Image (cartoon, grey):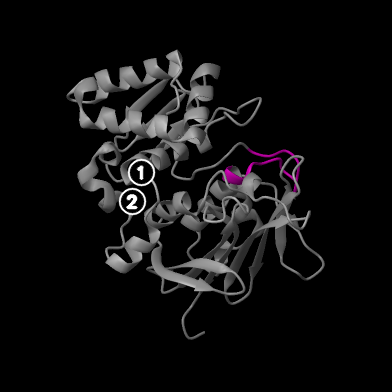
Amino acid sequence: MNKINPKLQTVLDNFAQNSLPNGKKSDEYRNLLAAVTASHALNERLNTAAKKGYLDKLAVNKNPNAGASYNASKTRISINLSQLKTRLLFQTTFLDKRSSERSASLPRKNPMQYTIATALTIGLLLSACSTANPILKKEGNIMNQDTQQIAGRPDLTAPEVLTKVLDFLRYAQSPEDFEIETAGKVMNLKLLERTDGYSDFYIGNKFGDSDWIWSINFTKDQSGKMRLHFGDVGGNSSATPICQMDLDQFHPLLVQAGFTYTGKGRLGKPFNGYEKKYPNGYEADLQVFYEGESAEKVLHDCINEITFDIFKPGS
């Protein structure tokens, strides 16, 4: 069990006293503590956020249909109270009700701790904990990181890259959204045009001093295509640098964004498949490819590629 530092404990206790009907005696508070102490990654992020002053308050999201969000100016994470209630676990996290799909997508650990950990991690990914000089900004419907000042080569972590991709997955509804100006604004990144024909525009960089690189490429014709790729330039490196947000954590975020899980498949490597239908008649196919973290953690599914295609059926 991971420890909670005094500053974070104060944040959690104040949340219980001010936002939960039964305070620290409530099931919601016990579920919250269980999640924070069970996940090392979440525990470390929350402790650091509270210690550095990036997190002073937890609050209940006023929008009952919203998930977690971070307000940098108020150093506050807002969460949906239903995410702390066991009875709504599958309704809020796994919206596909088919038992065969649900059993394939359930996390290996305690599902209640997992749901809360996901909700809080979403908020933290939006915070300034990963940057030395956070840029304060208002809450919005689009989950964006700070604007990157190095065009085409921002210094991001794997969870930050996945959050940028998720921003675009939430926003895009037709090939018209696959423009460099639109994608750049939605993801809050300075994208670069490509001249080699591989794609229309892109962005990418290395993950620190690791052997892993990342790139996001966009192409627009009759359909719109986006591809995220995590590459191992060392050839046989552990996937740990790209595994802070794994497949189990990413799945409920896609479901909450309106994508329907269609099952597992294999195109050279295994993937989770998803689809989405839009009111304008367009449809989307989404594949999330994954691999084991290492020989010792081969069953820990790390995301290594995402392909996203919006098209008009029959065109």
Mark 1 lies on residue:
115
**Is residue 81 toward the left or the right of residue 253 in the image?**
left
Measuring from the top left, give residue 301's x and y in whole percent. 53, 55
Left or right placement of residue 289 versus residue 19 in this view: right
Location of residue 269 with respect to 43 vertically, above or below:
below
Q: Is residue 67 visible?
A: no
Question: Most prominent secondary structure in the magenta stretch?
Answer: loop
What residue is shown with label 2? 93
N-term-proximal mark, 1 vs 2: 2
| The quadrant where residue 70 appears | top left
Quadrant of res 198: bottom right
The residue that appears at 62% across and 73% down in the rendered structure is 268
Instruction: Determine the secondary structure under disc 1.
Output: helix
In the rendered image, the quadrant that contains the N terminus is: top left
Looking at the picture, how far across and down is residue 104, in whole percent?
38, 63
**Relative height, residue 224 to residue 128 (above, below):** below
Residue 140 figure quarter: top left
Q: Is residue 264 visible?
A: yes
Q: Is residue 95 left or right of residue 77?
A: left
Q: CA distance from mark 1 to mark 2?
A: 7 Å
Of the pair 255 and 170, the residue shown nearer to us: 255
* Nearer-the-camera pick, 45 or 238: 238
Q: Residue furthest right?
A: 196
Q: Which residues are magenta?
A: 147-159
> Which of the two residues, 171 or 203, is positioned nearer the viewer here?
203
Q: At 77% across and 40% down in the image, what residue appears?
A: 209
Q: Are marks 1 and 2 in contact (CB under 8 Å)?
A: yes
Q: Amino acid at mark 1?
A: Thr
Point out the residue furthest to the front here: 296
Q: Residue furthest left?
A: 22
Between 297 and 80, the one lying in front of the other is 297
